[in-house]
Image (cartoon, rainbow, N blue to C red):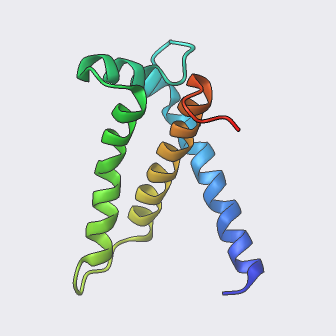
């Protein structure tokens, strides 16, 4: 794969991530302004941090990707790959937002 081909894949993936986050905003936040409210609520329900609530939700997508990668003699539709990859990346973007907002990192 050339650098140009990879750059196109990367740009396309970032666009898919942005579109998915935009489309699912209302589903996961209701009418709340807080984009991360679902993770705060889940954290409260589970008596844990928002980061832990998020990675718990993300685990489902990672396990699904793992299963797809290790499935023997099975091919999956590109749309399914796109969905699982996009969801996994979006959880990482949301985790980055939680970490930044809460300042839960060591500062140099």
Q: Residue at x 26, y 20 (%)?
A: 47
Q: Determine whether, in the image, residue 44 is placed left or right of residue 51.
A: left
Q: Determine whether, in the image, residue 103 is placed left or right of residue 58.
A: right
Res. 98 image quadrant: top right
Residue 65, x across and y down, in percent: 34, 64
72 over 93 or under it: above or below:
below
Residue situated in front as seen by the camera: 21 or 23: 21
Name of the residue lying farthest toward the front: 108
Residue 17, x across and y down, in percent: 58, 49
Q: Residue at x 66, y 61 (%)?
A: 12
Q: Could you tell me which quadrant the C terminus lies in?
A: top right
Res. 99 image quadrant: top right
Q: Determine whether, in the image, residue 77 is placed left or right of residue 71.
A: right
Residue 1, x across and y down, in percent: 66, 87
Res. 28 image quadrant: top left
32 over 54 or under it: above or below:
above
Name of the residue lying farthest toward the top: 32
């Amino acid at each position: 794969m050339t650098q140009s081909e990879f750059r196109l894949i990367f740009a396309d993936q970032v666009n898919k991530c942005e579109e998915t986050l935009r489309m699912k905003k209302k589903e996961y936040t209701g009418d709340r302004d807080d984009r991360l409210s679902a993770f705060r609520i889940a954290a409260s329900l589970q008596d844990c941090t928002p980061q832990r609530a998020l990675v718990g939700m993300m685990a489902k997508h990672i396990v699904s990707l793992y299963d797809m990668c290790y499935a023997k003699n099975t091919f999956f539709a590109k749309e399914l790959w796109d969905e699982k990859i996009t969801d996994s990346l979006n959880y990482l973007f949301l985790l980055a937002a939680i970490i930044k907002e809460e300042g839960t990192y060591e500062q140099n």
